Image (cartoon, helix red, strand yellow):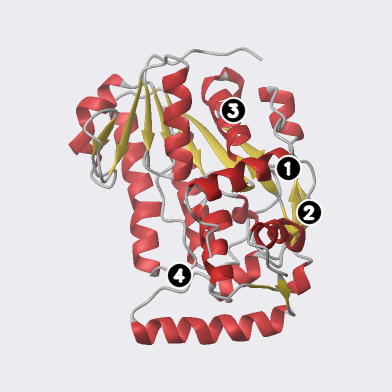
Amino acid sequence: MSEQTPNKVMITGANGFIGNSLMRHYQQQGIDVVGVDLRGDGASIVEGDIGNPETIAELLDQCDIIIHTAALVSNALSDADMWRVNVQATANLIAAAEKHNVRRFVQLSSIVAYGNSAAGELHEDHPVHADGGSYVLTKLASEHAVLAAHAKGNIEIVIIRPGDVYGPGSRPWLILPLEAIHKGQFMLPEKGEGFFRPTYIDDLIRGIVLAAACPEANGEIFNLSCQGYISSKEFFSHHFSWLNKKGPMVVSTRLALIAANLATKLANLTGGVNEASTATVAQLSTKSWFSIEKAQRILGWVPEVSFEEGMDRSKQWATDQGLLKK
């Protein structure tokens, strides 16, 4: 695999879990990188709205690679907000990237693009399926916006479909579950036997960086996940162990869907947000895992951080953040 060192990289969603990890990686490698987010830091992250990319036109002129991580990652927010951020802003940004002669656009999608009903080992050419709520639908639509731009022949693209990305700072797989366990509100559908594909953040970052730099990656979609899968019960049992609690509680998917519906109705009445929605139940009930042969063959990428090491690092971070206190 050959690599092409970028002149300057732009990372959208630079305050987020993946975006900020990418920022740190490029900075440590001495590569010129700038972050864009709705809130700047007065230093390497610039305040900007990717939905209106001409506000960052000067930066677009300087960068040869954009890694687009900005997105609403939620199973509870409104369809309109999800569409505006995940789809329309992506379409606006890649159009501006074409206009300003950005060489390559790397889109962070998700393995949810395959849909929640897909089963077995899935390769990148497996048909996508929008059966999972607004998050799934908008991830599919954002991929379409990127592929449509690439079809015009003016910009290189790479689409990344990460597995279940965990590690220090992970909101869906670390922070929110610990909060729910503290409140006694955590349960798993499918009696805990849904498939979980734990992908440690550092491994994902290496894969994204390789995809951004590899000439042969142009026009390709890559699964960046683990080898195989574990059960959701096995994954979340660590969280309970850290808190010296028994669990997790496992129930049928039918019962979990009833509970999720009731919780969502209550949240709507009180003005809250219920991330443990029916879409989340469906996601945790899936029976699929993802081939990473293509990433290995083209990028030379394989996961390097063992699950045990990744969970040890996650526990240490959660301890340092005070998330394990009673």
What amino acid is at disc 4? Ala
Query: Which tag is nearer the camera, tag 1 or tag 2?
Result: 1
Q: Residue at x 78, y 53 (%)?
A: 230
Label 4 sits on residue: 76
Q: Residue at x 73, y 28 (%)?
A: 296
Q: Are marks 1 and 2 in contact (CB under 8 Å)?
A: yes
Q: Is residue 158 above or below residue 263?
A: above
Q: Residue at x 71, y 65 (%)?
A: 117
Label 1 sits on residue: 307
Does the image show residue 214?
yes
Q: Are marks 1 and 4 in contact (CB under 8 Å)?
A: no
Q: Quadrant of residue 191?
A: bottom right
Give whichever of discs 1 and 3 has the lower sequence position: 3
Q: Give the image location of residue 135, x and y in percent.
A: 50, 61
Looking at the image, how many numbered discs can be counted on the residues?
4
Label 2 sits on residue: 230
Query: Which tag is nearer the camera, tag 4 or tag 2?
Result: 2
SS for dot 2: strand
Give whichever of discs 1 and 2 has the lower sequence position: 2
